[in-house]
Amino acid sequence: MLQLNFQNKYLECGTDEAGRGCLAGPVTAAAVILPADFHNDILNDSKLLTSKKRELLEVILKKESLSYGVSHVEMETIDEINILNASILAMHQSIDQLTSRPEFILVDGNKFKPYQNLKHECIVKGDSKFLSIAAASIIAKTARDAFMKKIDQEYPMYEWAKNKGYPTKAHRAAIRKYGVTKYHRKSFRLLPNQLELNL
């Protein structure tokens, strides 16, 4: 059973990102403030739900949340500042978009940089423990999936509508065959080493 709040003293937002381990596309984060009486039996970590359930929940969460924000940080920035910093930047930018100012930030994972002067708490596997982080994980994932489906029309050979930019066998085979695109993260190891020496 997921908890609604980490604490009850301050107005709390949850934040999470999607697409950190991908070879192509942005890293996307969302921030969500849920009402004090929020309840939903399906809501859970986005990775445990089908895409159909995520899309259904996205509509409910956007309608019922007090406020939400979503931000994509593009490939060039990921390559420039690294994926961890890009993920935190995406979280900060999604919090910037909240129409209600939170007083406390609940972060999925174990790394974060202070946002303005607000208190925050990092929770490992927070998307399976707290509703606001689970909500942020759903909104981030559906927004990123929509982005990947859109760019799939431009480069159908990489099958991004299916693999969402993750390092699947088919995605890597396409990189080997067709090379890299403007959507690939050049700082990532896009292909495994061709020759590995047993030293």
Image (cartoon, helix red, strand yellow):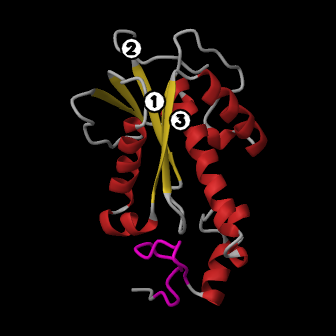
- The boundaries of the magenta stretch are 180-196
Local secondary structure at mark 2: loop
Q: Amino acid at mark 1?
A: Gly
Which residue bears the numbered disc 3?
136
Which residue bears the numbered disc 1?
14
Q: What residue is at 54 percent from the left and 64 percent from the top?
A: 25
In the displayed structure, 120 sits above or below 6; it is: below
Distance between the alpha carbons at the discs numbered 3 and 1: 6 Å
Counting from the top left corner in percent of width and height, residue 148 is at 63, 61
- Side (left or right) of 67 relative to 80: right
In the displayed structure, 63 sits above or below 144; it is: above
Q: What residue is at 44 percent from the left and 89 percent from the top?
A: 197
Sequence-wise first label, 1 or 2: 2
Sequence-wise first label, 3 or 1: 1
Is 190 magenta? The answer is yes
Q: Which of 192 and 142 lies nearest the eye of the viewer?
A: 142
Label 2: how many residues lie within 10 Å, few (<14), some (14-19) or many (20+)? few
